[in-house]
Image (cartoon, helix red, strand yellow):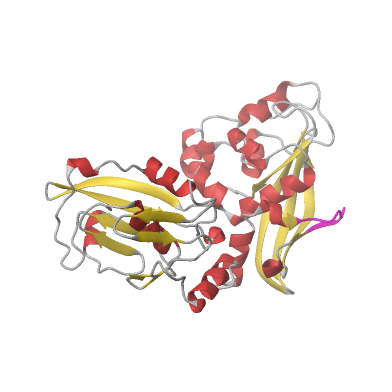
Amino acid sequence: MNITDLLSQEENDWLDFKQSWYHSNFDLIKDILCMSNSLSDKKERYIVIGVTDKDHKIIGISDGAGKWTSENITQLLLAYMTVIPEIVLIHVKVEGKKIDVLKIIPKRQDLPYVLDRKRYEEKIYNTQILFQNVVYARNNSRNTPSDRGADKIILEQLICRKKGLDLSPIERFNYYVRDIDSWVCPKNDEESILYCNKAEAADLQIFVKENRSFSLCSGEDIRTYNDFLTISGLNDTVWNWKKYTTSCSIEEGFSFYSVTVKLQSTTIKRFNIVGLDLKHEPFPGFNSFFVPEFGWDCHYSKGDIINLPEYQVCRLMCKVHNENRENDEILDYLNWEYLGDSSAFWDKYSYRRMEVRKNS
């Protein structure tokens, strides 16, 4: 959100205005805690410094007030907290005056944020204390008083959010599938069934079933790089090695998997992934990697793919099949020119006939 949009808003549960920089660490830490534990639906929360809170008049901040950075605010919090929200301090000029925007980005899985290392105590005119393991929060435009914790209803809603109980079934799946270590998969040759071992998500199951496979050793299954690319998304590093080598394992190839996500017995999502079984360079030793089914019409960046729930299942399947490999290793060998814009890729290389690989 840009500064103009922020200045057009009234103070609320994700936005606060300060006329000047904090004179004490006490107030700074408390306001960050309260913003982090706000029940706002906004992913980012803001404290705008150098602006009056009532009429939003731009006062600006003095040069001497600029001692704070994202880094030293982060270090201040880490002295009292094990887990902290992401902190970004932005310096901007409006109407020729300097103002600071403190952006706070909490994570749902880390709620509620508390001073769990030790309490913070500060004495100016009198002793002020932020107590250890007490939840301070923000309700509308008001912060929790420092001498008591947040109300019970706010605590309950924070825990509800942490567990994803406020989310729709699809949102719950997207939330929990990112926590790879919370999933287990009993051995099953015909179908992999992944279970979430967290009590609040025990009703989620992922069924992964192999449908068909292609061998890289036989020129009958995959004859050209075009075929190879549209199935796997891989660049020509692996293709060229297979093309010219005299060594190929019958185990090497691609497998297509159907994935069904269920909440209790209800199917909430279906999609396909591709297993890449590779034995030689650039992956010595037998390895199984997984990618989403890309197809012919692609418009993905690396960030897009990494954030796909489908890719999180690929990570889970790699963990099931490999002891010492991370699925993210395969990202360096994907053809990002093709995945970024497949139509432009085919237009650019339409003159080039990809060679048929000779049988080993």
Q: Residue at x 46, y 53 (%)?
A: 85
Q: Position of residue 118 (x, y in %)?
A: 52, 53
Q: How many marks?
A: 0
Q: Position of residue 236 (x, y in %)?
A: 62, 29
Q: Residue at x 71, y 35 (%)?
A: 223
- In the rendered structure, the answer to whether residue 209 lies left or right of residue 36 reads right
Judge whether 159 appears above or below 116 on screen: below
Q: Is residue 21 visible?
A: yes
Q: Residue furthest bottom?
A: 153
Q: Quadrant of the N terminus?
A: bottom left
Q: Residue furthest front?
A: 126
- Residue 229 located within the stretch drawn in magenta: no
Judge whether 206 appears above or below 280 on screen: below
Judge whether 251 appears above or below 49 on screen: above
- Residue 185 located within the stretch drawn in magenta: yes
User: Which segment is the magenta one?
Assistant: 184-193
Residue 144, quarter of picture:
bottom left
Q: Residue at x 21, y 54 (%)?
A: 20
Q: Position of residue 249 (x, y in %)?
A: 83, 31
Q: Residue at x 48, y 47 (%)?
A: 78
The majority secondary structure of the magenta stretch comes to: loop
Residue 211, quarter of picture:
bottom right
Q: Position of residue 11 (x, y in %)?
A: 27, 68
Q: Residue furthest left?
A: 96
Front residue (pair 84, 270): 84
Front residue (pair 339, 138): 138
Q: Quadrant of the C terminus?
A: top right
Q: Is residue 167 visible?
A: no
- In the rendered structure, the answer to whether residue 313 lies left or right of residue 37 reads right
Front residue (pair 249, 122): 122
